[in-house]
């Protein structure tokens, strides 16, 4: 039971890691989406962040609302290109499941801690969550998702790790692309975060409208809105500008990808996998996006207030890692059991699964002398 899609879309699955009877009343990829939504890692996304720390304010995006935005943008693109919407949605909702607390800072620190023990990659961790770490089904560990969903979740992977992964790691060795659905989810992620970081950045006061007026893509859309609605209050002007930027990106992506697909003329998913990247922005829009990303990196992600939080979160993760590695019995019992097999990996899984506030509380419990 698959919706109507083009022949080079994912029409059916290669299968699950462990064979299961086909679902009734929903597609294989709808079942994957449903399993992802019911996972505990998905619920924890509500209290994890990308740039801002979770307790900084109720209006900022969390990884949960980010993932929902990625799914929405991804479905729209997939619908326009007649690709498998359910698969895009499943990949989008799962793509950040392996993220550590404290966004990029947390992930870099955990990677540094894990250097002597095989490292840490958040994409690989997302796959580990759905393959191994979720423990809710009687028959198997993980969520036993379809190959195509797992392929989409594993956006990047080192060659060394790819060799260990079997089928789902092969494309990194053969230098192939994933399905168009995975490519769509990846770019929907980029569209979502660039735009919501502009919105959140302005709301937090870390970036200003003066700074953004130097950035072509923002200036262009803002001028368009200001000309149409000269009396618009500033907050609405920002929203209207951001929504128009998202619309420009989605429209451009659909047009440019349609053009590339027509040119490459793939007849199957396998032909898509060996073709160059078929989902992408036009040159002009890609250049504008690049400028926006560089701006956000400098002005927002390296803002001194973000850097201070980054520093603090590094310390929290380093302290927790050192303490648990030194004495695994400080961890809850289920992680102690796992530590008997692979101590560093068990500590890493425990920390990676924490939300921002849980990591802060755990640090207090272990290191603040006046805490219980
Ligand atoms: Mg993301």
Image (spheres, rainbow, N blue to C red):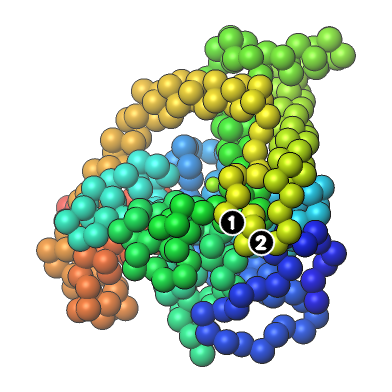
Residue 64 image position (x, y, % from top left): 58, 52
Q: Residue 280: name its quadrant.
A: top right
Marks 2 and 1, Cα distance to the nearest angstrom? 6 Å
Q: Tell me the SS state at disc 2.
A: helix
Q: Residue 182: name its quadrant.
A: bottom right
* Residue appearing at x 58%, y 39% in the figure: 190
Q: Answer yes or no: is residue 216 visible.
A: yes
* Residue appearing at x 61%, y 75% in the figure: 14
Q: Which residue is mark 1?
A: 273
Residue placed farthest to the right in the image?
A: 228
Q: Is residue 5 left or right of residue 349?
A: right
* Residue appearing at x 85%, y 64% in the figure: 4
* Label 2 crowd (10 A; few <14 / some 14-19 / many >=20): some
Residue placed farthest to the left in the image?
A: 326
* Label 1 crowd (10 A; few <14 / some 14-19 / many >=20): some
Q: Is residue 111 left or right of residue 3?
A: left
* Residue nearest the observer in this picture, 177 or 94: 177
Is residue 350 positioned above or below 363 on the image?
A: below
Residue 68 image position (x, y, % from top left): 66, 51
Q: Residue 129: name its quadrant.
A: bottom left
Is residue 92 positioned above or below 138 on the image?
A: above
Which disc number belongs to residue 269? 2
Residue 6 image position (x, y, % from top left): 80, 59
Q: Quadrant of the N terminus?
A: bottom right
* Residue appearing at x 48%, y 42% in the figure: 50
Q: Exactly how many numbered labels are in the figure?
A: 2
Q: Tell me the SS state at disc 1.
A: helix
Verify CB contact (< 8 Å) between mark 2 and mark 1: yes
Q: Quadrant of the C terminus?
A: bottom left
Residue 33 image position (x, y, % from top left): 65, 67
* Residue nearest the observer in this picture, 366 or 22: 22
């Amino acid at each position: 039971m698959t919706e109507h899609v083009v022949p080079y879309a994912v029409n059916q699955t290669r299968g699950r890691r462990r064979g299961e009877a086909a679902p009734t009343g929903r597609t294989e990829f709808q079942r994957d989406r449903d399993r992802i939504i019911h996972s505990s890692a998905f619920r924890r996304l509500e209290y994890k962040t990308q740039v801002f720390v979770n307790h900084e304010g109720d209006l900022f995006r969390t990884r949960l609302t980010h993932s929902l935005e990625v799914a929405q943008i991804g479905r729209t693109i997939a619908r326009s290109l007649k690709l498998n919407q359910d698969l895009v949605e499943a990949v989008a909702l799962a793509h950040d499941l392996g993220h550590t607390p404290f966004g990029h800072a947390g992930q870099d620190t955990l990677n540094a801690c894990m250097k002597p023990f095989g490292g840490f990659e958040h994409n690989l961790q997302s796959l580990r969550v759905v393959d191994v770490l979720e423990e809710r089904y009687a028959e198997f560990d993980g969520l036993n998702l379809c190959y195509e969903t797992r392929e989409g979740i594993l956006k990047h992977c080192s060659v060394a790790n790819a060799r260990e992964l079997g089928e789902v790691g092969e494309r990194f060795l053969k230098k192939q692309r994933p399905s168009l659905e995975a490519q769509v989810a990846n770019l929907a992620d980029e569209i979502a975060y660039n735009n919501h970081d502009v919105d959140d950045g302005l709301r937090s006061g870390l970036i200003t409208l003066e700074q953004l007026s130097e950035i072509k893509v923002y200036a262009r859309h803002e001028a368009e809105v200001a000309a149409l609605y000269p009396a618009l209050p500033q907050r609405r002007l920002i929203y209207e500008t951001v929504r128009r930027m998202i619309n420009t990106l989605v429209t451009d992506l659909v047009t440019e990808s349609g053009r590339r697909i027509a040119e490459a003329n793939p007849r199957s998913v396998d032909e898509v996998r060996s073709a160059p990247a078929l989902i992408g922005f036009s040159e002009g829009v890609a250049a504008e996006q690049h400028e926006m990303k560089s701006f956000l990196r400098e002005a927002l992600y390296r803002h001194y207030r973000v850097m201070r939080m980054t520093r603090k979160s590094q310390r929290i993760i380093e302290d927790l890692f050192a303490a648990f590695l030194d004495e695994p019995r400080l961890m809850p019992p289920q992680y102690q059991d796992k530590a008997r097999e692979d101590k560093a990996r068990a500590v890493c899984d425990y920390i990676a699964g924490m939300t921002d506030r849980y990591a802060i509380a755990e640090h207090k419990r272990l290191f603040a002398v006046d805490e219980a």
